[in-house]
Amino acid sequence: MILSTRRTVARTLTITALCCALLTTGTIAGPVAATSDSSATNANVSAATADVSATVTAAAEREPPAGVGTFRSAGTEQRLARGVTHESFTLGNPGVEYSWTVQVTLPSKQEGVRDSQVSSRSTAHHVAAELREAGLEANAEAVVAGRLADSGGYLGHRVRVGAFPTEAEAEATRSELTALGYSGGTWYEGWDGDQPSSGPRSGPVNVDVLTIDPRRFKGEVTGTFGEDLEGTETTSDLAGGALAGVNAGFFVYGEQHGAPGDPAGAAAYNGEILSETVGDRPNLVIDHRSGHASIQRLTWEGRISSGREKLDLDGINRVPGKIRNCGGIGDLPTEAPKHDVTCTDADEIVVFTEEYGTITPEGEGLEVVLDRRGRVQEVNQDRGAELTEGQFSIQAIGDDAARLDEFATEARRIKLTNEYLDERGKKLRMTPHTQVLNGGPNLLTDGERNITAARDGMVHADNPGQFYGWTHQRNPRTIAGIDGRGRLVLITADGRQTDSLGLSISESADLAERLGLVDAINHDGGGSTAMVVDGELENSPSGGAERAVGDAIVIRER
């Protein structure tokens, strides 16, 4: 619905420049966060420091100081409703161009550590030398990330081959690389997180911002997952008929990781808890009736009980034995959050509510089907049941199947307890208006940068490329937070395109801070990033088309 009172005005937005740690320090700041060579010698680290110092000095000499500090971008602002605005603007210089190159995948040379685009200094220099002997213009470069709350610093060395004006020319060289037995991919250097993010050489980033003032907006801000929790829909479909919508939490992507569409972290809609947390990762909590929003680290507890007998639950509304992003008790290889990794657990009890879908996951194990009052209707010796309205079920695998069988046989009525706890261990008060959307890492807390990439699972000792590619390099991003006036702010930034480079996680925090947010988290990004206003997709998805996602934040009038 387009309000007759809407006004669209052009204005100039002055955005304080995003900081770039690589251009402001000549030494390695902070510990090694994700180097693949844990036994690197002091000599190697000292050599890496020297390489970084030389790189920083050269970069500082090339960067004209007059452009550093602030830059301007023309943009637009729309009033969608009383208390709701949409802004669109471009950061940086739209005319700047970067070179294409070939980014080489380096061997880790360590058991249990994946090959990646960053490795030890010695490995990178050895590979670069081999490629130069074969006639390719290869260089080894130290990579240093800005210092975050619990990670950053020296990430290792990478190897780049050539600098080309077009992707096609880079692709031709990549084919030569493949013929030599190496793997790699073409890469636009503007997507590097260590490129300058301010001044005339800073590249463009297209940004959209929704601001909702709870004191003035009389509508609702809710989370929605569509028809079934296990399915996916585009943000455009989820926001159908609404003022606006933005993609929200992480979700299962690919059947090998569970049921596609399932939240990969906390999720509650209209007061109903439908997914457990990933450890204590941060979440956006919204009360759409009061308009109040907050960022909270929550944990989850679930159990079933009958009289004095109780059984702890491992999860809710997900395939037993598969835990996307990890973070649960008994998970392997870790009980800590581990982003984009599917942990396993051979012995689990998982409950399924009617929101999951009509048919529960199939497989070996046990399933107990109950009516809305908790009375046992069926006890099936394998998993996979078609639930009717009002029914829910409990599945168990491994050794827990026998435990559930004994419990259900003796139970007259089974009660489900399902709750979130805050950092103090206090139960989160759930009302019919409470929404919880998962995210991570944290970006801002009480107006201060507080990027907890390691705590929230973005630093992997067995995959140095995770932090480098996901956190340090520029990608499309979706950000949510609360500003100093108590308003909910939802931000999307396009990326992985030549006309919109994206943001590193550090730059995401900088943008949130400079837009006035005091608390902020990162939501699902990449190809999932999408903002819809009045039924129209406002941003440009990196995959060329809008991705179907697990859930979205939707702004509706009452």
Image: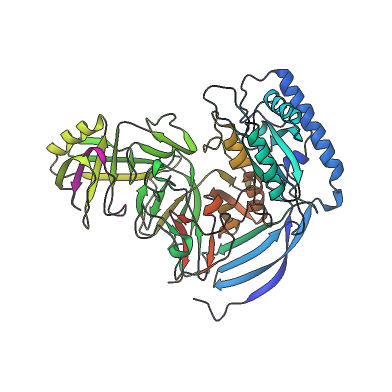
In this picture, residue 415 sits left or right of residue 211: left
3, 463: nearer the viewer = 463
551, 271: nearer the viewer = 551
How is the model colour-coded?
A: rainbow
Is 369 a magenta residue? Answer: yes
The residue furthest bottom is 4
Report if residue 251 is visible in the image: yes
Q: Residue at x 35, y 40 (%)?
A: 301
Q: Residue at x 20, y 53 (%)?
A: 372
The quarter holding residue 382 reads top left
In this picture, residue 361 sits left or right of residue 173: left
Q: How many marks?
A: 0
The quarter holding residue 176 reads top right
The residue furthest front is 179
Residue 399 locus on image (x, y percent)? 25, 29
Above or below, 120 relative to 372: above
Is 552 a magenta residue? Answer: no
Which quarter of the figure is the C terminus placed in?
bottom left
Q: Residue at x 69, y 44 (%)?
A: 172
Above or below, 481 relative to 11: above
Residue 21 locus on image (x, y percent)? 73, 40
Report if residue 147 is visible in the image: no
The quarter holding residue 427 reads top left
- Magenta stretch: give its range: 355-373
426, 192: nearer the viewer = 192
Residue 248 locus on image (x, y percent)? 49, 54
Residue 282 locus on image (x, y percent)? 50, 44
Q: Residue at x 51, y 24 (%)?
A: 112
